[in-house]
Image (cartoon, helix red, strand yellow):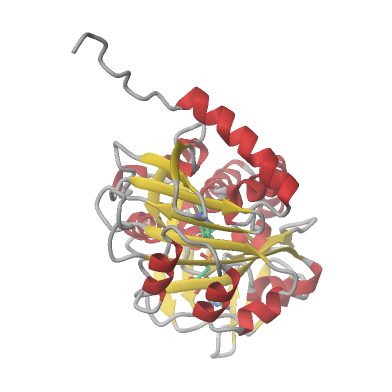
Amino acid sequence: MRALVVGLGVAGMAAAIALSGAGWTPVIVERAPARRTGGYFVGLFPAGKKAASRLGVFDAMHLRTPADHRTWAVDAAGVRRRSVGFLDQPGQPEGTMRGDVEAALWDGLSPDTEIRFGTGPRSIRQAGDAVHVDLGAGPERFDLVVGADGLRSTVRRLAFGPDERFLRPNHSVICTFSLDGPVPGYSGSDQLALVEPGRSLWIFPYRDRPPTALFAYRARDVAAELRKDPAEALAARYAGMGGPVPWVLDRLGSAPERLFDSVQQVRMRHWHRGRVLLLGDAAWCLTLYSGMGASTGMMGAAELGDALTAEPTVARALRRWERRMRPTIRTHQLIAHVKGEGFVPSSPFNHGVRRVVVGQAAKLLIREPRPAMGLS
Ligand SMILES: Cc1cc2nc3c(=O)[nH]c(=O)nc-3n(C[C@H](O)[C@H](O)[C@H](O)COP(=O)(O)OP(=O)(O)OC[C@H]3O[C@@H](n4cnc5c(N)ncnc54)[C@H](O)[C@@H]3O)c2cc1C
Protein backbone atom coordinates (compact mmCIF):
# COMPACT_ATOMS: atom_id res chain seq x y z
CA MET A 1 0.00 0.00 0.00
CA ARG A 2 1.44 3.37 -1.05
CA ALA A 3 0.78 6.50 0.99
CA LEU A 4 1.52 10.04 -0.10
CA VAL A 5 2.68 12.23 2.78
CA VAL A 6 2.56 15.94 2.01
CA GLY A 7 5.04 17.94 4.11
CA LEU A 8 8.46 17.17 5.55
CA GLY A 9 7.84 18.72 8.98
CA VAL A 10 7.41 17.01 12.34
CA ALA A 11 4.00 15.53 11.47
CA GLY A 12 4.98 14.42 7.95
CA MET A 13 8.17 12.64 8.96
CA ALA A 14 6.48 11.11 12.00
CA ALA A 15 3.69 9.86 9.73
CA ALA A 16 6.18 8.34 7.28
CA ILE A 17 7.94 6.48 10.11
CA ALA A 18 4.64 5.18 11.48
CA LEU A 19 3.42 4.16 8.01
CA SER A 20 6.64 2.24 7.32
CA GLY A 21 6.22 0.53 10.68
CA ALA A 22 2.69 -0.50 9.69
CA GLY A 23 3.97 -2.05 6.45
CA TRP A 24 3.08 0.81 4.13
CA THR A 25 5.32 2.48 1.55
CA PRO A 26 5.36 6.24 2.14
CA VAL A 27 6.30 8.83 -0.48
CA ILE A 28 6.97 12.28 1.00
CA VAL A 29 6.60 15.45 -1.04
CA GLU A 30 7.92 18.76 0.26
CA ARG A 31 7.32 22.15 -1.33
CA ALA A 32 10.70 23.56 -0.23
CA PRO A 33 13.80 22.72 -2.29
CA ALA A 34 15.58 21.08 0.68
CA ARG A 35 15.01 19.96 4.25
CA ARG A 36 14.93 22.92 6.62
CA THR A 37 16.93 23.09 9.83
CA GLY A 38 16.96 25.51 12.79
CA GLY A 39 13.58 26.96 13.62
CA TYR A 40 12.61 28.10 17.09
CA PHE A 41 12.31 26.92 20.69
CA VAL A 42 10.15 23.82 21.10
CA GLY A 43 9.41 22.31 24.50
CA LEU A 44 8.59 18.62 24.67
CA PHE A 45 6.19 17.57 27.41
CA PRO A 46 5.98 13.94 28.64
CA ALA A 47 3.32 13.10 26.02
CA GLY A 48 5.66 14.27 23.27
CA LYS A 49 8.61 12.35 24.67
CA LYS A 50 6.43 9.24 24.85
CA ALA A 51 5.24 9.69 21.25
CA ALA A 52 8.84 10.17 20.08
CA SER A 53 9.78 6.96 21.90
CA ARG A 54 6.92 5.08 20.23
CA LEU A 55 8.32 6.22 16.89
CA GLY A 56 11.79 5.07 17.98
CA VAL A 57 13.39 8.53 17.72
CA PHE A 58 13.46 9.94 21.25
CA ASP A 59 16.94 8.64 22.15
CA ALA A 60 18.38 10.40 19.08
CA MET A 61 16.76 13.72 19.90
CA HIS A 62 19.09 16.56 20.84
CA LEU A 63 17.74 18.00 24.09
CA ARG A 64 19.10 21.35 25.19
CA THR A 65 17.57 22.32 28.55
CA PRO A 66 20.29 23.92 30.68
CA ALA A 67 20.64 21.90 33.90
CA ASP A 68 20.88 25.07 36.00
CA HIS A 69 18.27 27.21 34.24
CA ARG A 70 16.64 30.04 36.19
CA THR A 71 13.64 32.14 35.24
CA TRP A 72 13.46 35.90 35.70
CA ALA A 73 10.40 38.08 35.46
CA VAL A 74 11.70 41.39 34.13
CA ASP A 75 9.64 44.56 34.17
CA ALA A 76 9.59 47.32 31.57
CA ALA A 77 12.32 49.20 33.45
CA GLY A 78 14.58 46.15 33.47
CA VAL A 79 14.10 45.29 37.16
CA ARG A 80 14.23 41.52 37.64
CA ARG A 81 12.90 39.04 40.19
CA ARG A 82 13.03 35.25 40.30
CA SER A 83 9.97 33.67 38.76
CA VAL A 84 8.76 30.61 36.89
CA GLY A 85 8.23 30.16 33.17
CA PHE A 86 7.78 27.66 30.37
CA LEU A 87 10.55 25.29 31.42
CA ASP A 88 9.28 25.17 35.01
CA GLN A 89 5.84 23.80 34.12
CA PRO A 90 4.63 20.47 35.51
CA GLY A 91 6.04 17.59 33.50
CA GLN A 92 9.34 19.47 33.11
CA PRO A 93 9.28 20.04 29.37
CA GLU A 94 12.58 19.48 27.58
CA GLY A 95 13.84 22.42 25.56
CA THR A 96 14.86 21.73 21.95
CA MET A 97 14.76 23.51 18.62
CA ARG A 98 12.16 22.51 16.04
CA GLY A 99 15.12 21.48 13.89
CA ASP A 100 16.29 19.07 16.61
CA VAL A 101 12.95 17.27 16.61
CA GLU A 102 12.93 17.17 12.82
CA ALA A 103 16.56 15.94 12.66
CA ALA A 104 15.75 12.97 14.90
CA LEU A 105 12.71 12.12 12.79
CA TRP A 106 14.72 12.48 9.59
CA ASP A 107 17.28 9.99 10.90
CA GLY A 108 14.41 7.67 11.87
CA LEU A 109 12.93 7.51 8.35
CA SER A 110 13.11 4.11 6.72
CA PRO A 111 16.01 4.20 4.18
CA ASP A 112 13.66 3.28 1.33
CA THR A 113 11.33 6.25 1.95
CA GLU A 114 11.06 8.21 -1.28
CA ILE A 115 11.33 11.98 -0.83
CA ARG A 116 10.60 14.50 -3.56
CA PHE A 117 11.52 18.12 -2.95
CA GLY A 118 10.13 21.18 -4.67
CA THR A 119 6.69 19.78 -5.30
CA GLY A 120 3.23 19.47 -3.83
CA PRO A 121 -0.32 18.50 -4.77
CA ARG A 122 -2.20 20.47 -7.43
CA SER A 123 -5.35 18.38 -7.39
CA ILE A 124 -6.69 15.45 -5.38
CA ARG A 125 -9.42 13.13 -6.65
CA GLN A 126 -10.78 10.08 -4.87
CA ALA A 127 -12.27 7.10 -6.74
CA GLY A 128 -13.10 3.96 -4.77
CA ASP A 129 -10.06 2.93 -2.76
CA ALA A 130 -7.69 5.05 -4.84
CA VAL A 131 -6.61 8.65 -4.43
CA HIS A 132 -5.27 10.29 -7.59
CA VAL A 133 -2.95 13.22 -6.88
CA ASP A 134 -1.46 15.51 -9.47
CA LEU A 135 2.02 16.41 -8.30
CA GLY A 136 2.87 18.22 -11.50
CA ALA A 137 3.22 15.28 -13.88
CA GLY A 138 -0.42 14.19 -14.14
CA PRO A 139 -2.49 12.01 -11.78
CA GLU A 140 -0.57 9.49 -9.66
CA ARG A 141 -2.34 6.75 -7.69
CA PHE A 142 -2.01 6.33 -3.92
CA ASP A 143 -3.90 4.24 -1.37
CA LEU A 144 -3.84 6.99 1.26
CA VAL A 145 -2.91 10.69 1.38
CA VAL A 146 -1.66 12.29 4.61
CA GLY A 147 -1.79 16.07 4.56
CA ALA A 148 0.93 17.15 7.00
CA ASP A 149 1.48 20.47 5.29
CA GLY A 150 0.97 22.83 8.18
CA LEU A 151 -1.40 25.59 9.23
CA ARG A 152 -2.16 26.78 5.69
CA SER A 153 -2.49 23.27 4.29
CA THR A 154 -3.00 22.78 0.56
CA VAL A 155 -4.34 19.25 1.11
CA ARG A 156 -6.99 20.68 3.45
CA ARG A 157 -7.96 23.30 0.88
CA LEU A 158 -8.13 20.77 -1.98
CA ALA A 159 -9.96 17.99 -0.10
CA PHE A 160 -11.93 19.72 2.68
CA GLY A 161 -12.55 23.38 1.83
CA PRO A 162 -11.19 26.92 2.08
CA ASP A 163 -9.06 28.11 5.03
CA GLU A 164 -11.76 30.49 6.29
CA ARG A 165 -13.92 27.51 7.29
CA PHE A 166 -11.30 26.09 9.62
CA LEU A 167 -8.94 28.82 10.84
CA ARG A 168 -9.78 30.50 14.16
CA PRO A 169 -7.73 33.67 14.71
CA ASN A 170 -6.21 34.32 18.11
CA HIS A 171 -5.67 38.03 17.35
CA SER A 172 -2.02 37.87 18.15
CA VAL A 173 1.25 38.10 16.27
CA ILE A 174 4.58 36.46 17.04
CA CYS A 175 8.13 37.06 15.96
CA THR A 176 10.83 34.58 16.94
CA PHE A 177 14.54 34.44 16.10
CA SER A 178 17.92 33.36 17.46
CA LEU A 179 20.13 35.74 19.40
CA ASP A 180 23.89 35.85 18.93
CA GLY A 181 24.54 35.45 22.67
CA PRO A 182 22.99 35.78 26.12
CA VAL A 183 21.16 38.99 26.98
CA PRO A 184 23.71 41.34 28.63
CA GLY A 185 23.62 40.96 32.41
CA TYR A 186 22.13 37.47 32.21
CA SER A 187 23.65 34.04 31.80
CA GLY A 188 23.02 31.75 28.84
CA SER A 189 20.94 29.51 31.15
CA ASP A 190 18.50 32.26 32.11
CA GLN A 191 14.91 32.21 30.92
CA LEU A 192 13.40 35.71 30.78
CA ALA A 193 9.75 36.73 30.75
CA LEU A 194 8.74 40.35 30.16
CA VAL A 195 4.97 40.28 30.24
CA GLU A 196 2.62 43.26 30.04
CA PRO A 197 -1.02 43.47 29.00
CA GLY A 198 -1.07 42.88 25.25
CA ARG A 199 2.67 42.40 24.70
CA SER A 200 5.46 40.16 25.91
CA LEU A 201 9.01 39.09 25.21
CA TRP A 202 10.34 35.67 26.15
CA ILE A 203 13.96 34.53 26.08
CA PHE A 204 14.48 30.76 25.95
CA PRO A 205 17.85 29.39 27.07
CA TYR A 206 19.74 26.31 25.84
CA ARG A 207 22.71 24.51 27.27
CA ASP A 208 24.78 24.50 24.08
CA ARG A 209 23.63 27.31 21.81
CA PRO A 210 22.60 30.98 22.15
CA PRO A 211 19.07 31.76 23.36
CA THR A 212 16.07 32.42 21.13
CA ALA A 213 13.71 35.37 21.51
CA LEU A 214 9.94 35.27 21.14
CA PHE A 215 7.90 38.46 20.87
CA ALA A 216 4.15 37.89 21.20
CA TYR A 217 1.62 40.71 21.03
CA ARG A 218 -2.11 41.16 20.65
CA ALA A 219 -3.39 43.01 17.59
CA ARG A 220 -6.86 43.93 16.33
CA ASP A 221 -5.82 43.97 12.68
CA VAL A 222 -3.37 41.10 12.38
CA ALA A 223 -3.27 41.24 8.57
CA ALA A 224 -2.17 44.89 8.70
CA GLU A 225 0.58 43.98 11.18
CA LEU A 226 1.90 41.22 8.93
CA ARG A 227 2.14 43.60 5.98
CA LYS A 228 4.65 45.69 7.95
CA ASP A 229 8.36 45.13 8.14
CA PRO A 230 8.81 43.03 11.33
CA ALA A 231 11.44 45.39 12.79
CA GLU A 232 9.13 48.39 12.31
CA ALA A 233 6.09 46.55 13.64
CA LEU A 234 7.96 45.44 16.79
CA ALA A 235 9.61 48.83 17.35
CA ALA A 236 6.18 50.49 17.29
CA ARG A 237 4.46 47.87 19.44
CA TYR A 238 7.24 47.66 22.06
CA ALA A 239 7.90 51.40 22.26
CA GLY A 240 8.59 52.44 25.84
CA MET A 241 9.44 48.93 26.98
CA GLY A 242 12.99 49.06 28.32
CA GLY A 243 15.10 46.40 30.01
CA PRO A 244 16.50 44.00 27.43
CA VAL A 245 13.91 44.87 24.75
CA PRO A 246 16.00 47.41 22.75
CA TRP A 247 19.04 45.08 22.80
CA VAL A 248 16.96 42.12 21.58
CA LEU A 249 15.25 44.23 18.90
CA ASP A 250 18.67 45.29 17.61
CA ARG A 251 19.47 41.63 16.92
CA LEU A 252 16.46 41.05 14.66
CA GLY A 253 18.12 42.49 11.55
CA SER A 254 21.14 40.18 11.74
CA ALA A 255 19.25 37.03 12.80
CA PRO A 256 19.91 34.15 10.36
CA GLU A 257 16.18 33.40 10.14
CA ARG A 258 13.02 34.68 11.74
CA LEU A 259 9.34 33.78 11.88
CA PHE A 260 6.85 36.67 11.84
CA ASP A 261 3.33 35.27 11.75
CA SER A 262 -0.20 35.30 13.08
CA VAL A 263 -1.45 32.85 15.69
CA GLN A 264 -4.40 30.71 14.63
CA GLN A 265 -6.06 27.49 15.61
CA VAL A 266 -7.47 24.97 13.16
CA ARG A 267 -10.86 23.56 14.14
CA MET A 268 -12.37 20.71 12.10
CA ARG A 269 -15.22 18.29 12.76
CA HIS A 270 -13.45 15.54 10.78
CA TRP A 271 -9.80 15.04 9.99
CA HIS A 272 -10.31 12.52 7.24
CA ARG A 273 -12.49 12.29 4.21
CA GLY A 274 -12.37 8.93 2.44
CA ARG A 275 -8.67 8.16 2.18
CA VAL A 276 -7.38 11.70 2.62
CA LEU A 277 -6.32 12.48 6.15
CA LEU A 278 -4.89 15.57 7.84
CA LEU A 279 -2.28 15.43 10.60
CA GLY A 280 -0.48 17.95 12.83
CA ASP A 281 -1.00 21.68 12.33
CA ALA A 282 -2.92 21.03 9.09
CA ALA A 283 -5.59 19.20 11.09
CA TRP A 284 -5.67 20.82 14.52
CA CYS A 285 -3.06 23.55 14.92
CA LEU A 286 -3.22 24.23 18.66
CA THR A 287 -1.10 27.42 18.49
CA LEU A 288 2.38 27.74 19.93
CA TYR A 289 0.84 28.75 23.26
CA SER A 290 -0.23 25.16 23.97
CA GLY A 291 3.37 23.92 23.71
CA MET A 292 1.95 20.67 22.34
CA GLY A 293 1.96 21.07 18.55
CA ALA A 294 5.06 19.00 17.86
CA SER A 295 4.08 16.49 20.52
CA THR A 296 0.56 15.93 19.18
CA GLY A 297 1.92 15.71 15.63
CA MET A 298 4.09 12.77 16.68
CA MET A 299 1.33 11.31 18.83
CA GLY A 300 -1.13 11.46 15.93
CA ALA A 301 1.36 9.67 13.68
CA ALA A 302 2.06 6.92 16.21
CA GLU A 303 -1.70 6.40 16.71
CA LEU A 304 -2.19 6.25 12.94
CA GLY A 305 0.42 3.52 12.61
CA ASP A 306 -1.20 1.52 15.41
CA ALA A 307 -4.68 1.91 13.94
CA LEU A 308 -3.57 0.82 10.46
CA THR A 309 -1.88 -2.23 11.99
CA ALA A 310 -4.82 -3.18 14.22
CA GLU A 311 -7.78 -2.72 11.88
CA PRO A 312 -8.65 -4.92 8.90
CA THR A 313 -9.65 -2.00 6.64
CA VAL A 314 -8.31 1.51 6.06
CA ALA A 315 -11.75 3.02 6.67
CA ARG A 316 -12.00 1.41 10.11
CA ALA A 317 -8.45 2.38 10.95
CA LEU A 318 -9.06 6.06 10.15
CA ARG A 319 -12.26 6.12 12.20
CA ARG A 320 -10.46 4.50 15.12
CA TRP A 321 -7.60 7.00 14.76
CA GLU A 322 -9.95 9.99 14.92
CA ARG A 323 -11.73 8.58 17.98
CA ARG A 324 -8.40 8.13 19.75
CA MET A 325 -7.06 11.61 18.93
CA ARG A 326 -10.20 13.74 19.36
CA PRO A 327 -10.33 14.02 23.21
CA THR A 328 -6.62 14.88 23.47
CA ILE A 329 -6.81 17.55 20.80
CA ARG A 330 -10.03 19.04 22.15
CA THR A 331 -8.43 19.38 25.59
CA HIS A 332 -5.27 21.02 24.29
CA GLN A 333 -7.20 23.39 22.05
CA LEU A 334 -9.10 24.64 25.09
CA ILE A 335 -6.02 24.79 27.32
CA ALA A 336 -4.17 26.74 24.63
CA HIS A 337 -6.45 29.74 25.22
CA VAL A 338 -5.62 29.75 28.92
CA LYS A 339 -1.91 29.28 28.28
CA GLY A 340 -2.07 32.06 25.70
CA GLU A 341 -3.14 34.43 28.47
CA GLY A 342 -0.05 33.31 30.35
CA PHE A 343 2.19 34.06 27.37
CA VAL A 344 0.60 37.38 26.46
CA PRO A 345 -2.38 38.53 28.52
CA SER A 346 -5.14 40.04 26.40
CA SER A 347 -6.26 42.56 29.07
CA PRO A 348 -5.02 44.31 32.24
CA PHE A 349 -7.38 42.10 34.26
CA ASN A 350 -5.91 38.88 32.83
CA HIS A 351 -2.45 40.31 33.38
CA GLY A 352 -3.34 40.80 37.05
CA VAL A 353 -4.64 37.22 37.32
CA ARG A 354 -1.45 35.98 35.70
CA ARG A 355 0.70 37.86 38.20
CA VAL A 356 -1.10 36.26 41.11
CA VAL A 357 -0.94 32.74 39.65
CA VAL A 358 2.71 32.98 38.62
CA GLY A 359 3.62 34.60 41.93
CA GLN A 360 2.05 31.70 43.87
CA ALA A 361 3.72 29.12 41.61
CA ALA A 362 7.07 30.87 42.10
CA LYS A 363 6.68 30.72 45.89
CA LEU A 364 6.02 26.99 45.68
CA LEU A 365 8.64 26.05 43.12
CA ILE A 366 11.65 28.27 43.68
CA ARG A 367 13.96 26.80 46.26
CA GLU A 368 16.80 29.25 46.77
CA PRO A 369 19.69 27.97 48.87
CA ARG A 370 19.28 29.38 52.39
CA PRO A 371 22.02 31.75 53.47
CA ALA A 372 24.41 30.12 55.95
CA MET A 373 23.49 30.97 59.56
CA GLY A 374 26.17 31.94 62.06
CA LEU A 375 27.95 34.79 63.75
CA SER A 376 30.39 36.93 61.90
C1 LIG B 1 7.21 30.02 17.83
C2 LIG B 1 6.65 28.65 17.99
C3 LIG B 1 6.89 27.93 19.15
C4 LIG B 1 6.40 26.65 19.31
N1 LIG B 1 6.63 25.98 20.47
C5 LIG B 1 6.21 24.71 20.60
C6 LIG B 1 6.53 23.96 21.78
O1 LIG B 1 7.12 24.48 22.73
N2 LIG B 1 6.14 22.66 21.84
C7 LIG B 1 5.47 22.07 20.80
O2 LIG B 1 5.16 20.86 20.89
N3 LIG B 1 5.13 22.76 19.70
C8 LIG B 1 5.49 24.05 19.58
N4 LIG B 1 5.17 24.75 18.46
C9 LIG B 1 4.31 24.12 17.44
C10 LIG B 1 5.08 23.18 16.55
O3 LIG B 1 6.28 23.77 16.11
C11 LIG B 1 4.19 22.83 15.38
O4 LIG B 1 2.95 22.38 15.87
C12 LIG B 1 4.80 21.74 14.52
O5 LIG B 1 6.12 22.05 14.14
C13 LIG B 1 3.93 21.57 13.29
O6 LIG B 1 4.46 20.58 12.49
P1 LIG B 1 3.72 20.15 11.16
O7 LIG B 1 4.59 19.13 10.55
O8 LIG B 1 2.30 19.81 11.44
O9 LIG B 1 3.65 21.47 10.25
P2 LIG B 1 4.81 22.39 9.68
O10 LIG B 1 5.93 22.52 10.64
O11 LIG B 1 4.15 23.64 9.24
O12 LIG B 1 5.37 21.60 8.43
C14 LIG B 1 4.67 21.56 7.22
C15 LIG B 1 5.62 21.18 6.11
O13 LIG B 1 4.86 21.07 4.92
C16 LIG B 1 5.48 21.79 3.87
N5 LIG B 1 4.43 22.21 2.95
C17 LIG B 1 3.55 23.21 3.12
N6 LIG B 1 2.72 23.26 2.06
C18 LIG B 1 3.10 22.30 1.21
C19 LIG B 1 2.63 21.86 -0.05
N7 LIG B 1 1.59 22.43 -0.65
N8 LIG B 1 3.26 20.81 -0.64
C20 LIG B 1 4.34 20.21 -0.05
N9 LIG B 1 4.82 20.58 1.14
C21 LIG B 1 4.20 21.62 1.76
C22 LIG B 1 6.19 22.94 4.57
O14 LIG B 1 7.22 23.46 3.77
C23 LIG B 1 6.70 22.24 5.83
O15 LIG B 1 7.93 21.61 5.62
C24 LIG B 1 5.63 26.06 18.29
C25 LIG B 1 5.36 26.77 17.11
C26 LIG B 1 5.86 28.06 16.97
C27 LIG B 1 5.56 28.81 15.70
* Nearer-the-camera pick, 208 or 137: 208
7 w.r.t. 186: above or below: below
Identify the residue shown where x is 29% and y is 19%. Answer: 371
Q: Position of residue 300 (x, y in %)?
A: 58, 49
* Nearer-the-camera pick, 194 or 142: 194
User: Is 321 placed left or right of 31 in the picture?
Assistant: right
Q: Position of residue 108 (x, y in %)?
A: 35, 54
46 w.r.t. 18: above or below: above
User: Is 163 placed left or right of 59 in the picture?
Assistant: right
> For the N terminus, which image quadrant?
bottom right
* Nearer-the-camera pick, 340 or 108: 340
Quadrant of the image occupied by residue 181? bottom left
Name, please, the residue furthest toward the bottom.
137
> For the C terminus, which image quadrant?
top left
Name, please, the residue furthest toward the left.
376
- Residue 65: in sight, yes or no? yes
Q: Position of residue 177 (x, y in %)?
A: 42, 67
Quadrant of the image occupied by residue 111? bottom left
Identify the residue shown where x is 52% and y is 78%. Answer: 230
Name, please, the residue furthest toward the front.
376
